[in-house]
Amino acid sequence: MTLDDFRASLADAAPPALAAPVEALWWTAKGDWDRAHRIVQDADGPDAAWVHAHLHRMEGDLGNAAYWYRLAGRPVARGGLEEERDAIAAALLGDPVARSAR
């Protein structure tokens, strides 16, 4: 799946089969922060931590976000939230667009 496929799937009522961190990003893009947070809270690994960081950044809890960025081994994001979400989605999907964001 590419980032464009991911974006197109947002028109659907439910996500396609996705790894938990990407599914959390899908729900985030649909405006369901709570559902996205529950998904990554129950997932392990650096990808889930990266998405978890993004979610706490969205809510303005920058201290908590910084903790999750450290667990993910990623720098704290500084750009726009939608830009960051798309970069994370592309990276986790293996979309070539994301290779420069890694």
Image (spheres, rainbow, N blue to C red):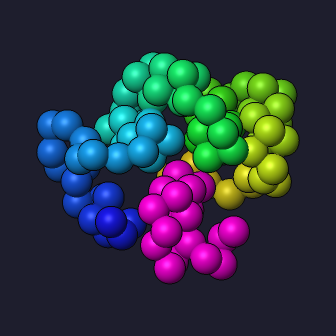
Q: Is 5 located above or below residue 85 in the figure?
A: below
Residue 66 image position (x, y, % from top left): 82, 36
Q: Residue 75, located in which quarter of the rendered image?
A: bottom right
Instruction: Tell me which secondary structure the magenta stretch mostly adopts.
Output: helix
Q: Please, is residue 95 above or below residue 31 in the view?
A: below
Which of the pair 44/40 is nearer the observer?
Answer: 44
Which image quadrant for residue 45?
top right
- Residue found at x 45% / y 62%: 93
Quadrant location, the N terminus: bottom left
Residue at left 15%, top 37%? 13
Residue 29 visible? The answer is: no
Pick the residue in front: 46 or 75.
Answer: 46
Quarter of the figure with residue 84? bottom right
Image: magenta residue range:
84-102
Total marks shown come to 0
35 sits left or right of 66 in the view = left
Residue closer to the observer: 17 or 2: 17
